[in-house]
Amino acid sequence: MNMNVPKLYFDGQMVDVLWDNHEEAIRWYETYMGWEVQQKESWKPDPRCTHGKMTRMNAGTWLISSLSNERLPHHYAERGTVESNIRLCWRVADLQQFHNRCQSDGVRVTELYRGPGETDYFDFWATGEGIRFTAQEDKRIQEGFAPSWLRIGVSDLGKSVQWYRNWLGMDLENDWSKDGYALMSLGLNRRPGDKSLWVLEQLPENAYTGKADGQVQPVCWVAERSDFFNYQTFLLDSGVETSDIGGYVTRGMVSFHLYDPDGNRLNISSM
């Protein structure tokens, strides 16, 4: 690991939600995934916002909405363009039952397919905005949805494994390259000793690669504020593309995002 890369911890995910859809999105996750509101407040993610909403739901999932008179450097998502190659997976005991429910209610879904870990998946597009998540079968789940791993599509598996080790400090847990996968890990914020799991998976040859600012954005946390600013400077000096820093630069939460070689977006935050 490069000594200029601070210790990073996975801190959950931000879901960028349009302002007028915020309450509807909460109801959708309550209805279909059994989630509950853990925290809800008016909060502007950046001082350049005129208004902001922030709702924390299950497993470190933050729904973020904001209004501003200018494009923010970090707090944004692109809509109506290409689909991100990042899949946030949720384990459920009866995959077919959930698939049937989504289909009967008109929720957009893929067919069930076999994927990493020799298990079945399907993608579904949540809320009226069509925010993609992935359901994964796990018969051990008692009820509801449990967090799983993140799946990230890459064009060169070997080079991407090295990139995530070099620039994010991830560990390689299992090399399944013969099957087109590699299992990486990163520590979990506020849960010492626990790990988050990340699956890098080889994309098909014709798959799109390029920057994609999807609505589902994994967040990596830097514990020391000074390390956060030094890290962003180091990345830029090293030729790794990042956004400008958003948030409260003088005091408060700050964030930027970077892109891996295939344009997958990862958010970096600190307080």
Image (spheres, rainbow, N blue to C red):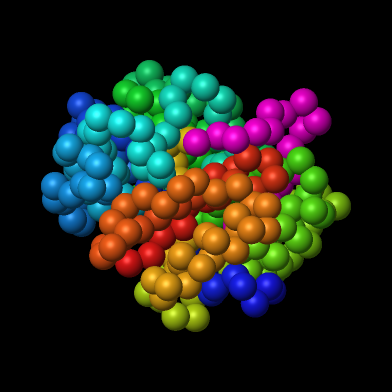
Location of residue 100 in the rendering, given as x and y in whole percent from the top left corner: 44, 28
Residue found 50% across the figure and 36% down from its top: 213
In the foreground, 209 or 146: 209
Q: Is residue 203 magenta?
A: yes
Q: Is residue 123 magenta?
A: no
Task: State whether residue 124 is above or below residue 107.
Answer: below
In the foreground, 78 or 180: 78
The stretch of residues the image draws in magenta is: 197-213
Res. 101 image quadrant: top left
Q: Is residue 62 left or right of residue 5?
A: left
Task: State whether residue 66 appears in this view.
Answer: yes
Residue found 60% across the figure and 63% down from its top: 234
Q: Is residue 35 left or right of residue 82?
A: left
Res. 20 image quadrant: top left
Task: State whether residue 85 is above or below residue 100.
Answer: below
Most frequent secondary structure within the magenta stretch: loop
Task: State whether residue 256 is above or below residue 216.
Answer: below
Location of residue 194 in the rendering, given as x and y in whole percent from the top left corner: 49, 75
Q: Quadrant of the N terminus?
A: bottom right
Task: State whether residue 88 appears in this view.
Answer: no
In the foreground, 183 or 155: 155
User: Which residue lies most toward the bottom here?
Assistant: 193
Location of residue 269 in the rendering, given as x and y in whole percent from the top left corner: 41, 60
Residue found 42% across the figure and 73% down from its top: 226
Q: Quadrant of the C terminus?
A: bottom left
Q: Is residue 156 left or right of residue 233?
A: right
Location of residue 219 in the rendering, given as x and y in whole percent from the top left corner: 45, 55
Residue found 65% across the figure and 77% down from its top: 3
